[in-house]
Structures are given as C-alpha cells and as structure tokens.
Image (cartoon, rainbow, N blue to C red):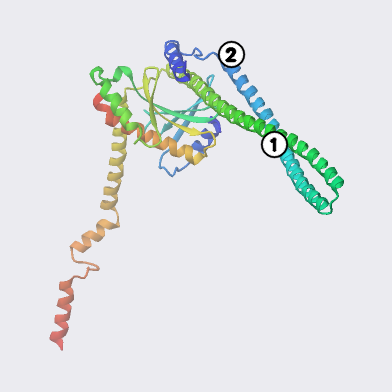
Amino acid sequence: MNIHKIANYLNTLADSETGMTFDCQPISGEVDVLQITILGREELPIFVSVTDDQILCITYLWGEEEVKIECINDMHVSMLEMNIPMPLSSFSKIGDKYVVFGALSISSNFDDIEHELTVLNNNALEVIDDMSEYLI
Amino acid sequence: MSIFKKIMTAIRGGASEVGESIIDTNATRIFEQEIRDAENHLTKAKRDLTGVMAEQMSANREVDRLKREITEHEGYVAQALEKNDESLALAVAEKIANLESELAAQQQAFESFQGSANRLKELVKKSERQVGEHKRQLSMVKTTESVQKATSAITDNFSSSNSKLLNAKDSLERIKAKQQKFDDKMKAAEVLEAESGDGALEAQLKAAGIGAQSTSANSVLDRLKAKQNKA
C-alpha cells in the first residue's frame, strides 16, 4: 500500500458507500503525504502517510494558542476520557497542535481505509463541537 | 533510558527546528543491523537445536535398545544356571556388565543432550522475545521520524500555498453552515416538487371533491343506507 494507490482509489470512487466525496492531493517531501479533503468539509483535511508497517491518518484539530488557558487541564481530562469511546481514532499532539489520528495495518484494504477516513473526519467534527467550550 | 523517554526528549528537542531530523539516522541503521544480526543468530540457534534434539532422540533409542538387550541376557543367565552351566552363565553375565556400562554412558549422553536442548530452547525463546521487542522499538523510532518528516512536509505545503490552518471553531462553523445550506437546498427542492408536481394538482382536485375519493366509514355507511332504502 502507498499513498498513490490510495489516491487513485479514492479519486475514482464516484459514489462512496459512506456518501462522501474525496479529493486527494499528494504532497511531496522526504516522506510522501496525501492530503485528503472531503467535499463540504474542506476545512478539516486528513493527512495520510504510509510507513513500513502502518498507514497513519492525521487530522489537525486546533493549536495550543486556541485553548482558553484556564481550561487546558479540564480539556486534557475530557480528551483522555473521550479517547476510548471515540471509535477508531485517538488524540495526540504534534508540536503545538492537537490532532486526532488513526493507524491502520499496512495490509488493510481500500474499504478499511475509506471507512477509517470517514470515521476520522466525523470524529474530528464532533470533537471540535464537544470541546468548543474550552476553545477561544 | 526507556525508548518512550528517548522519543519524548527527541520530539521536544526537535520541535523548535522543523525539518531537522530528530532521530540519529546512523543510530537507527546500527539498530537495524543489530536486529538483523540477532535474527541470524536466532536462525542458527534454531538449527543447532534441531541437531541436538535429533541426537537426543537417537540416544534415547540406544538407551531403550540396551535396556532390552540387558533384560534378554538376564534371561539367558537364568537359563544357563538352570542347566547348571556356571561358566556359560558367567560369560553372559560379563556381557551384561559390558552392556550396563554402555547403557550408563548412553544414559549420560542422553541427559546431556536433553540439558543442551532445554538450554537452547530457553535461549531461542529469550532471543525471540528480544528481537520482537527491538523491532517494536525500532518501529516507534521510525514512526516518530516519519511523522516528523510528514509534518514538516505539511507545514511547508501550507506556508508555500499561503493558506493556513483555520481556527478550529471557525472551521466547524463553516462546515456547519455548508451543511445547513445543503439541507436548505434539499428542503427547498422538496417544497418545489410538492408545489409544482403532480402532487399539488391532485391535492387541489381532492380538496374540490373531484377525482377518486378516499373511502371513509361514513361514505360506506351512506352507500349501504341508500341500498336499504331502495329495497
């Protein structure tokens, strides 16, 4: 599995069973990254990279500077508590950005990847909605 | 230092300098080589183990054979004694003594093979665990490195395209607004369909009492009453 195969599959997907339309844009760099946007939800792109043993799908949520400083501990607790109930995705932090991510086995099929992307995107939307009380 | 701590230190130290490799690639290569070496040793140890186990089995068979032979010869001694042939009995007894010393030697060899096999099995198990653990650690280091590189590619992409990650709440509002707009459009289309389609005309006709009327209990009763009056 590599990002080009994923991009080809998602781009040719006329009508996804998930009801979503994907647009894929490869970003070249030392590590190839695929930027995937979902129609109507362009503000929350998903970044996919493929390593030796896994496929990582990451969506940026918000930056440290967007968190109300007095709420940061409560927010962290809420995120930890939500981490298990949230299907397929987990929270993390890259640099000063909070992210939600999902990791798949390198041997996953296209359906699994499509499902992962859809769930990740829905989770991201819901998380921002739920956590907005902690955000500026 | 545990691998978790190393990675955390590397991430925090590297966070200020985006794009710079946070993990010493040379160290990663050495680590990979070490894992490969360990795997080679493991393959060799497994081969050795097979050899030792084969020796152990053959020693075991030899022990069984000698035991059987001793029992057999003990029978001969008894038979010779029955026939009062003391010298023959002595000769067989000598043979038994030889067989017994051979048995002792084989027994010892068997036990020594068994000991080696057990030690090798233990070693193989331990090495397998260790290789697995090293692989897991390497995968963590590589993933960290790859995410760091991917992040820098993403950041570069954003800064070069002059676009910027939006504020999370703004993003949510925009997406919700788009969704709302889409829903409104769908609803508007439904309304339009109802107003201009066949549905609207039928409803008007019905209201005016023209066309197929739905049967109600009252209309049925009226019909039956009319029938009765006629009769």
Question: Would residue A83 be seen by someone viewing this image from the given angle?
Answer: yes
Look at the numbered disc 2 and give the secondary structure of its residue. helix
A34 shown above or below B73? above
Question: Would residue B174 be seen by someone viewing this image from the given angle?
Answer: no
Label drawn at residue B33: none
The amino acid sitting under disc 1 is Met
In the rendered view, does A58 fall on the left or right side of B135? left
Q: Residue at x 27, y 31 (%)?
A: A130
**Discs 1 and 2 lie in a common subunit:** yes
The amino acid sitting under disc 2 is Asn
Disc nearer the start of the sequence (1/2):
2
What subunit carries mark 1? B
Residue position marked by numbered label 2 in the rendering: B26
Residue position marked by numbered label 1 in the rendering: B53
Q: Circles 1 and 2: CB distance less than 8 Å? A: no
In the rendered view, does B139 fall on the left or right side of A102? right
- Could you say where residue A104 lies in the image, as x and y percent from the top left? 48, 34
Q: Residue at x 41, y 39 (%)?
A: A20
- Could you say where residue A86 lies in the image, as x and y percent from the top left? 35, 35
